[in-house]
Image (tube, rainbow, N blue to C red):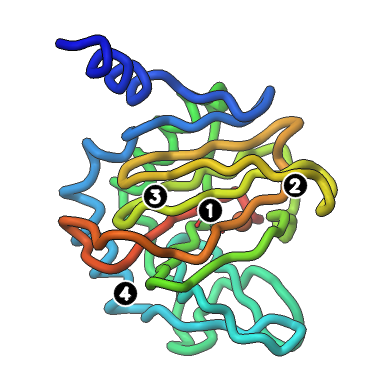
Amino acid sequence: MTPADLFSHQEQDQPVTLGPGAVVLRAHALPFIDELLPAISAIEACSPFRNMVTPGGYTMSVALTNCGELGWWSDRRGYRYTRIDPITEKSWPDMPPSFLRLAQTAASKAGYPDFMPDACLVNRYLPGSRLSLHQDRNERDFSAPIVSVSLGMSATFLFGGLERSDRAARLELHHGDVVVWGGPDRLRYHGIMPLKGPAHGLLGEQRINFTFRKAG
Ligand code: SIN
Ligand code: FE2
């Protein structure tokens, strides 16, 4: 092993600290991948991806669906969580056991051992899709962290401060990476730069992101 190999190996294995309550767990999702991909197809077959409209009337470039007891929803009336998918008029699909294990193992590694998510947003980015800086603040209480999983194409994640105007750090997220933010970092602004770059070997020209939350 050359020193360069050793460095990249260490980089893969070491959690990257983003703040007192925020960490990147490189490749944490990889051992779950064989279970995750069929589970995404099953979710999508019940509640398809859709491009929601923001309260300001703008159609999001990221397509979204949900699994779990609660699902995130946006339209002209605002942002909220619902128990029923307004498109299918049925409950959101159940959270697959592999999703829950992934979320809980990541949260534990990040220092949040009792994480019990009741909502999982599934975001699909195609080339050009972006998510502007925002806070996750539609959840009832902020004591539980956010656990965010990246699959497919790599993306540039923006991790800002508690004010929209704070300078945001930029960091590349790759297939299998998991970011956890909670505690004093729970309300940090974050976003994703327009997706670009090479297609992913397994997922092609897309990036899938799950964010697990305790919403209710
Ligand atoms: C989100 O903030 O809901 C998604 C972040 C990401 O796609 O990594
Ligand atoms: Fe978010």
Q: Earlier in the sequence, mark 1 or mark 3?
A: 1
Q: Is mark 3 within 8 Å of ligand 1?
A: yes
When the figure is inspected, residue 47 is found, relative to residue 210, above or below; the finding is below
Can you tell which mark lies on residue 157?
none
* Disc 2 residue type (three-letter): Asp
Q: Secondary structure at mark 1?
A: loop
Residue holding disc 1: 118
Tell me the quarter of the image containing the C terminus: bottom right
**Camera-nearest label, 4 or 1:** 4
* Disc 1 residue type (three-letter): Asp
The residues bearing labels 1 and 3 have C-alpha atoms spaced at a distance of 19 Å
Q: Earlier in the sequence, mark 2 or mark 1?
A: 1
- Ligand 1's quadrant is bottom right
Q: Is mark 4 within 8 Å of ligand 1?
A: no
* Disc 4 residue type (three-letter): Glu
Residue holding disc 2: 141
Q: Residue at x 59, y 68 (%)?
A: 72
**Camera-nearest label, 2 or 4:** 4
Residue holding disc 4: 44
Please identify the quarter of the rendering in which residue 127 is found: bottom left
Residue 125 vs residue 2, the one in the foreground:
2
Q: Earlier in the sequence, mark 4 or mark 1?
A: 4
When the figure is inspected, residue 179 is found, relative to residue 193, above or below; the finding is above
